[in-house]
Image (cartoon, grey):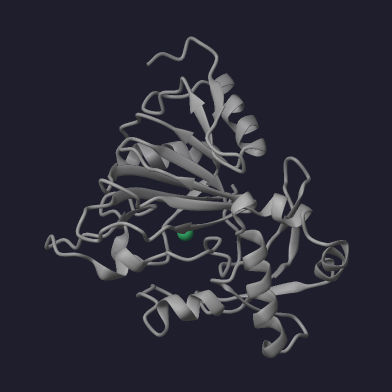
Amino acid sequence: MTQTQTPQLRPLGPALGTEALGIDLSKPLDAGTFAWIQAAFAEHPVLVFRDQDLGARELAAFGRRFGVPRPHALTKYRHAECPEVSWLTNVEETGKIDWYGVKRATDWHTDSTYEDTLPLLAMLHAKEVPSEKGGTMFADMRAAYDALPEAQKQRLSGLTGLHGRTDGPVGERLYGAEKGKTDKTYDEVPWPAVTRHPVTGRSILFVNPMHTHGFVGMKREEAWPLIEELADHATQERFVYYHRWRVGDVLIWDERATMHRGAGDYKPDERRIMLRTIVYPN
Ligand SMILES: [Fe+2]
């Protein structure tokens, strides 16, 4: 693969999902190619680079072009030599099925909104994939916002969401008391329910049912149904892209403009192993 030709974009789905063709991420990216990637990513918040073969350090280095990759809250899955990269895996070190890994992140969320700084983007690099299914789904929170009724937009413009670690309605359903071991505890963090994309200025619905557990000044009896209603709205088929993984895919997604989930639809005894990193602003 050479980088002498201008890279190309090819849509993968009607909502989200775009292939970036003609880029080899194992080589240092020149300024022009990286600027092209950044411009493409601002408009296409799920970008896929096929047929890559990166180690943890190379994935982190790609992340550092955008900002600062950070270690994930879950300590168990951190890469031994490169802590800002972690494993997304359904296999224990002993070779047995890792049931937490199977269940992990299989409902709608935006990553790490319980942290005091929001991530810019995250990256997954597929190393082993099941023979069928096992995809990752993405929802376009810009399009979801645009499609809300005007009265709902008005209401949300005055609301501040409250975020904790997997203690929203979906987080409680998926994990209950088994939220995984972290190396610190997390307080509640407020984020406006509607944000703007820093490059395009587009409005974004910024409420996710995994970590958003309330709104400032609203009782739980009112907040939880609203969180669920917004999640149902945003995850209608018309806003969702299902990514079918191929070994070698490097997929990057905009952590502010999208929600995502593991589809959770594969046979757990088939290996599904990826490298992951999450990138924060400089
Ligand atoms: Fe996630």
The reply to whether residue 145 is in sight is yes
Q: Is residue 137 left or right of residue 156?
A: left
> What x and y, as percent, mark residue 166?
50, 75
Looking at the image, which is closer to me, 151 or 64?
Answer: 151
Query: What residue do we see at 60% from left, 25% from top?
Result: 36
Total marks placed = 0
Residue 177, quarter of picture: bottom left
Vertical side of 113 occupied by 187: above or below: below
Towards the viewer: 72 or 148? 148
Q: Locate residue 224, reporting x and y percent.
A: 65, 81
Q: Is residue 223 positioned above or below 159 on the image?
A: below
Residue 185 in sight from this viewpoint: no
Expressed as whole percent of the image width and height from the top left, the position of residue 106 reads 42, 64
What residue appears at the point 42 percent right and 66 percent down from the top-left corner? 73
Q: In the current view of this chain or complex, which residue is farthest to the front?
A: 237
Q: Residue furthest top?
A: 4
Q: Quadrant of the N terminus?
A: top left
Residue displayed at 35% across by 52% down: 134
Give the image quarter of residue 188: bottom right
Q: Give how far across and how far down residue 215 sits, in percent.
A: 72, 79
